[in-house]
Image: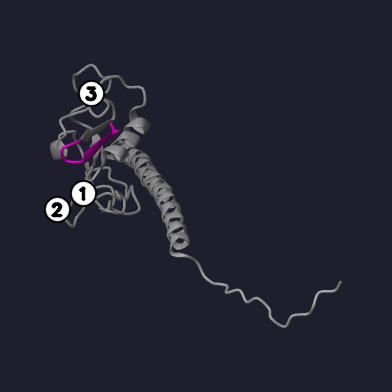
């Protein structure tokens, strides 16, 4: 038997859009993904900043060695914005006998050459509170004077550990007080023995 045709259709109400719970879940997932991306990109940025300091140290080593070969002295290169007087011995013409520079294309610049803060190239290990370098980890400073030392301000422990790993991997003793890299934890200062 055939069913009678009904003109009455059941109307269903359909809702469009998302529930509040669905929106909260989606937003939580987006926030979590953003956090992961942010952490990873921060580590890549920091790795790049550490690499730029390592490259700077390499360039300074070459410049210091050439300056020393020409003049018989160790150079100083300070940020002129902070200090008065001519402390741009690698970049500005000097009256020193044998000077044949410039040895660097441009002077050291805080927050550019050291993305974490100030920096200076000293002609001894006693600048900015450093006392010397215990190169072999035996507890005595082997390098105190007659050298080129790069002082870096604003160095966090994480950055200091990466710099120490690069410059001092395998040196015995306290990691932040032995080798060619020293770090003062209370002041956030790093010191790299550039040339001796």
Tag 1–tag 2 contact (CB < 8 Å): yes
Camera-side residue: 161 or 195? 161
> Closer to the camera, 181 or 186?
186
**Residue farthest toward the right in the current orientation of the protein:** 1
Q: Nearer the viewer, residue 188 or 42?
A: 42
Mark found first going from the N terminus, 1 or 3:
1
Q: Based on the picture, tell me whether residue 192 belongs to the magenta stretch.
A: yes
Around disc 2, counting alpha carbons within 10 Å, would you say few (fewer than 14), some (14 to 19), or many (20 or more)? Answer: few
Which image quarter holds the C terminus?
top left
Question: Viewer-nearest of labels 3 and 2?
Answer: 3
Percent x, y of residue 51:
39, 43
CA distance for labels 1 and 2: 7 Å
Asked whether 124 falls inside the magenta stretch, the response is: no
Residue 185, image x, y percentages = 19, 36
* Quarter of the figure with the N terminus: bottom right
Residue on which disc 3 sits? 134
Q: Residue at x 34, y 49 (%)?
A: 104
> How far apart, in angstroms, are the residues tagged by discs 1 and 3?
25 Å
Q: What range is drawn magenta here?
A: 185-196
* Residue at numbered disc 1: 78
Query: What residue does disc 2 label?
Result: 83
Q: Element under label 2? A: loop
* Label 1 residue SS: loop
Q: Residues within 10 Å of mark 3 (few under 14, many from 20)?
A: many
Q: Between marks 3 and 2, how big is the CA–CA gap? A: 29 Å
Position of 130 relative to 81 (above/below): above
Label 1 or label 2, whichever comes before in sequence order: 1
Q: Quadrant of residue 47?
A: top left
Instruction: Determine crowd level at label 1: few under 14, some 14-19, many 20+ residues with C-alpha closer than 10 A.
Output: many
Relative to 142, is 7 on the left or the right? right
């Amino acid at each position: 038997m055939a069913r009678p045709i009904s003109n009455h259709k059941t109307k269903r109400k359909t809702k469009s859009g998302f529930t509040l719970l669905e929106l909260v879940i989606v937003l939580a997932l987006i926030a979590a993904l953003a956090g992961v991306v942010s952490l990873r990109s921060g580590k890549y940025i920091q790795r790049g900043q550490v690499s730029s300091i390592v490259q700077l140290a390499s360039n300074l080593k070459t410049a210091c060695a050439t300056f020393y070969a020409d003049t018989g002295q160790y150079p100083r290169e300070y940020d002129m914005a902070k200090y008065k007087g001519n402390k741009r011995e690698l970049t500005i013409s000097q009256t020193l006998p044998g000077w044949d520079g410039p040895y660097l294309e441009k002077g050291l610049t805080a927050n550019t050459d050291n993305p974490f803060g100030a920096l200076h190239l000293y002609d001894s290990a006693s600048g900015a509170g450093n006392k010397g370098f215990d190169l072999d980890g035996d507890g005595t400073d082997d390098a105190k004077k007659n050298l080129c030392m790069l002082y870096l301000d604003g160095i966090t422990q994480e950055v200091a550990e990466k710099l120490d790993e690069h410059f001092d991997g395998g040196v015995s003793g306290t990691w932040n007080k032995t080798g060619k890299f020293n770090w003062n934890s209370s002041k956030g200062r790093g010191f790299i023995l550039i040339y001796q």
